[in-house]
Image: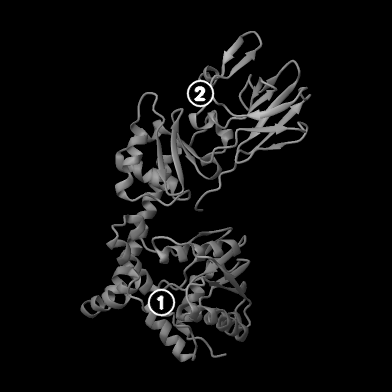
């Protein structure tokens, strides 16, 4: 194996110094120029430096016939370097943007293979960063988008690193030629119908001819904007702290914020704080859709406003805003028989209920509120369930899925609500573990 070019190898080693104690350095290996150079550099460095174990992952999208030969090429390269390779075949879901769908499928595979204390290394370089900034600028992105690709971010149970972001494509090409590396040229990279390819082949070369430092300057601007975004994130954390206080319904396990703490902020700081809070939960809306936040925030009276976003909904109830996704957006079936009350009852799309203490006698089943329910309370007689829920301030989005325990047609208990969740004299309680949030993004 040829020795790596000292400058590039030394820079890479320095960039990766904070992660030398990782369990595994896993290289995202497409077989293209960038990842081929990254893999070769790391395999070379591992011969003379104590590095974490190396492994490679190749994602096969199945979008073009030429790609069927790429896993074998990648296997040959990895075998020659002594690096184990995992090939993951994914299904790219149809959508408006093939580029985005392929990226989503690829990163889902990365998440699934990145374990605790693992680092996934990708080969994006400085030219890619400039391209990303220009692409997002043309789409009207804000500070977060214009900060470009982050050098590092969480991924699955580990993290993702882009250690070549300060390296130019020309440097990678020079290294590959000097070491006689073979790499894959993806035919789709020449297709100008893809926006990034159009920028790469027809826009950036013209800009670089007029301004030779254009790529370097754009990458530097992305770094400045990343720093600005970091300051905005710090401000958001400060503004969110008073809004993250607990409430009576923390047992729901749902992300929520106290609305009054946000109302004291300016419009811009509200958007910044809410964006920061939503970022791990959903794809963020563009500026044209932030009117949904205003409608949610400003609703009055008995309104039950909600704001639909890409991966869930924001609801407002009890002076808080609540994030709902996954099973919380699906209505549970009407009823479930409880043939073995001594065992937990799994409710379709609605978590689990259990009974503790001495089990009530009779034929039991769980229902959900339909309207008009009446409950017998010791010392209070028959009470309308709707009024009882109002008294306790139960959020509207919970009421239709709150488990109700019946014996035949008699309403015995309402799960988790004090004084309604069992019988003190008979010594039993009804407990509900709500469904876990299955979020669209992490």
Query: Which badge, 2 or 1, is on the more N-terminal residue?
Result: 1
Answer with the quarter of the image where residue 50 lies: bottom right
Residue 209 in the image, given as x and y percentages of width and height = 23, 80
- Closer to the camera in the image, 170 or 189: 189
Rendered residue at 61%/86% (across/down): 80
Answer with the quarter of the image where residue 262 lies: top left
Q: Secondary structure at mark 2?
A: loop
Quarter placement of the N terminus: bottom right
Q: Where does label 2 land, which residue?
A: 393
Residue 72 in the image, given as x and y percentages of width and height = 58, 82
- Figure check: 308 above or below 129: above
Q: Secondary structure at mark 1?
A: helix
Rendered residue at 30%/72% (across/down): 199
Count of residue discs:
2
Crowd tier of the residue under label 1, counting other residues whose Cα lies within 10 Å: few below 14, some 14–19, many 20 or above: few
Residue 154 in the image, given as x and y percentages of width and height = 52, 58
- The answer to whether residue 6 is visible is yes
Q: Where does label 1 land, which residue?
A: 188
- Figure check: 147 above or below 269: below
Rendered residue at 73%/29% (across/down): 355
Residue 88 in the image, given as x and y percentages of width and height = 58, 70
- Figure check: 168 above or below 223: below
- The answer to whether residue 168 is visible is no
């Amino acid at each position: 194996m040829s020795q790596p070019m000292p400058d590039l190898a030394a820079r890479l080693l320095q960039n990766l110094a904070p992660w030398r104690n990782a369990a595994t350095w896993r290289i995202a290996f497409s077989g293209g120029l960038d990842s081929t150079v990254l893999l070769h550099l790391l395999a070379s460095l591992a011969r003379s430096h104590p590095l974490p174990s190396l492994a490679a992952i190749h994602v096969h999208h199945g979008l073009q016939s030429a790609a069927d030969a790429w896993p074998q090429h990648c296997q040959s390269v990895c075998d020659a370097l002594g690096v184990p390779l995992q090939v993951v075949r994914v299904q790219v879901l149809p959508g408006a943007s093939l580029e985005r769908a392929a990226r989503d499928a690829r990163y889902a595979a990365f998440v699934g293979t990145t374990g605790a204390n693992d680092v996934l290394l990708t080969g994006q370089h400085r030219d890619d960063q400039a391209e990303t900034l220009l692409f997002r600028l043309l789409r009207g992105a804000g500070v977060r988008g214009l900060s470009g690709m982050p050098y590092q971010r969480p991924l699955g149970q580990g993290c993702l690193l882009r250690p070549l972001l300060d390296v130019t494509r020309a440097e990678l090409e020079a290294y590959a030629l000097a070491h006689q590396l073979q790499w894959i040229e993806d035919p789709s990279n020449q297709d100008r119908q893809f926006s990034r390819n159009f920028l790469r082949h027809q826009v950036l070369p013209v800009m670089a001819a007029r301004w030779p430092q254009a790529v370097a300057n754009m990458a530097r601007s992305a770094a400045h904007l990343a720093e600005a975004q970091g300051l905005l994130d710090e401000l958001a954390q400060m503004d969110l702290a008073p809004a993250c206080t607990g409430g009576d319904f923390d047992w729901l396990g749902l992300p929520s914020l106290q609305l009054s703490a946000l109302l004291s902020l300016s419009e811009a700081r509200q958007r910044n704080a809410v964006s920061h809070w939503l970022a791990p939960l959903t794809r963020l809306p563009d500026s044209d859709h932030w009117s949904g936040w205003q409608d949610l925030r400003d609703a009055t009276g008995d309104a039950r406003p909600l704001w639909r976003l890409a991966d869930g909904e924001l609801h407002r109830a009890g002076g808080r805003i609540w994030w709902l996704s996954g099973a919380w957006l699906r209505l549970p079936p009407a009823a479930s028989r409880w043939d073995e009350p001594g065992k937990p009852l799994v409710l379709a799309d609605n978590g689990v209920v259990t009974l503790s203490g001495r089990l009530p006698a009779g034929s039991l089943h769980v229902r959900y509120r339909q309207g008009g329910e009446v409950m017998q309370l010791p010392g209070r007689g028959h009470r309308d369930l709707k009024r009882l829920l109002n008294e306790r301030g139960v959020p509207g989005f919970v009421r239709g899925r709150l488990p109700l325990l019946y014996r035949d047609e008699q309403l015995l208990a309402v799960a988790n609500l004090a004084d309604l969740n069992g019988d003190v004299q008979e010594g039993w309680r009804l407990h509900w573990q709500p469904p876990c949030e299955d979020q669209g993004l992490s």
